[in-house]
Amino acid sequence: MSAASLLQLQVAPARYEIRLSGSGGQGMMLAAMLLCEAIGKDDRLNVVQTKSYGPEARGGASKADIVVSPNTIYYPKPLKLDLLLAMTQEALDKYYPDLKTRGTLIIDDTLVTTPPAGMYFGLPFTRLAREDLQNVMVANVISLGAIAAITEIVSREALTQAVLARAPRGTEEKNKLALEIGFREGEDLRRQPQYRDVPASPVWAWRDPVTRLGAED
């Protein structure tokens, strides 16, 4: 048995694995930190983040990974992704194989021109940031709002608090508007008929102590 297979046997299934990916400069590390802080506001959940540095941080495909669980997280890296955000075509091509068969894929269809044949959620994060807010640097914040609306992995209130707490002085209103755009666009997309049967993440259920069953991770 391979080391990876053995590890999968040892890690309990009550965990939700996320990867935010794009190109260096799109703010994926910051977005992951904000999402971690927002999820971590719920003391019934544990959350850890791992980052990718090096040449990727200067323009290639970059990523930041998050693991969420109601139990202690002994292994902080993802084994098979439940959620992948791909903000560029390069990021999608590189990381899509790491997504579970029935995992959730969210893409920026401004920059992803060749999406996979399967189910995915596509929103024009970069175009929305450029046209609605005149600043492409908040595309990452718009994507966080969409993730919250599509997956229910975090409450809107907790995410808003986390984003505004980290927003540079004078940019609070623009970041709040970016989140609201993401919430709106993600909710509208989620309501479309083809997505109605797509399950939300299990994290919302983990917030209910009655559902917190199973061994530790």
Image (tube, rainbow, N blue to C red):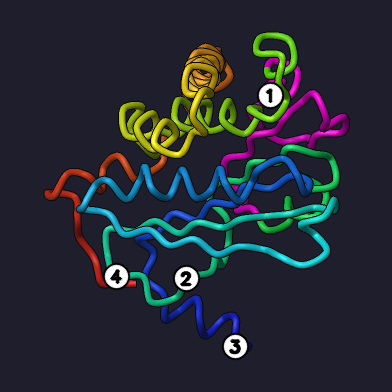
> Is 141 above or below relative to 104?
above
Which is in the foreground here, disc 3 or disc 1? 1
Mark 2 to mark 4: distance in Å? 10 Å
Q: Distance between the residues labelled 2 and 3?
A: 16 Å
Residue neighbourhood size for the residue with mark 4, other residues' Cα within 10 Å, grouped as few (<14), some (14–19), many (≥20): some
Residue 84, given in percent of the width and then of the height, sits at 62, 46
What kind of residue is marked 1?
Phe
Observer-nearest of 74 and 142: 142
**Residue 12 forms part of the magenta stretch:** no
| Amino acid on which the number 2 mark rests in the picture | Pro
Q: In this view, does 146 lie to the left or right of 88?
A: left
Per the image, the residue denoted by label 1 is 125
Classify residue 44 as left or right of residue 167. Answer: left
Spot the residue most to the front: 169
Query: Callout 2: 10 Å neighbours few (<14), some, many (20+)?
Result: some
Residue at left 20%, top 53%? 44
In contact (CB < 8 Å): disc 1 and disc 4: no
Q: Residues within 10 Å of mark 3 (few under 14, many from 20)?
A: few
Q: Quadrant of residue 26?
A: top right
Dot 2 or dot 3, earlier in sequence: 3
Is residue 118 inside the magenta stretch? yes
Q: Mark 4 points at which residue?
A: 72
Helix, strand or loop at mark 2: loop
Q: What amino acid is labelled 3 in the image?
A: Ala
Q: Name the residue under label 3.
A: 3
Q: Position of residue 145 (x, y in %)?
A: 50, 27
Up the image or down, 152 lies above or below 63; here it is above
Q: Is residue 163 above or below residue 52?
A: above
Q: Give the range drawn in magenta.
A: 99-128
Contact, mark 2 vs mark 3 (Cβ under 8 Å): no
- Residue 35 seen in the current view: yes
Where does the C terminus fall, quadrant-wise?
bottom left
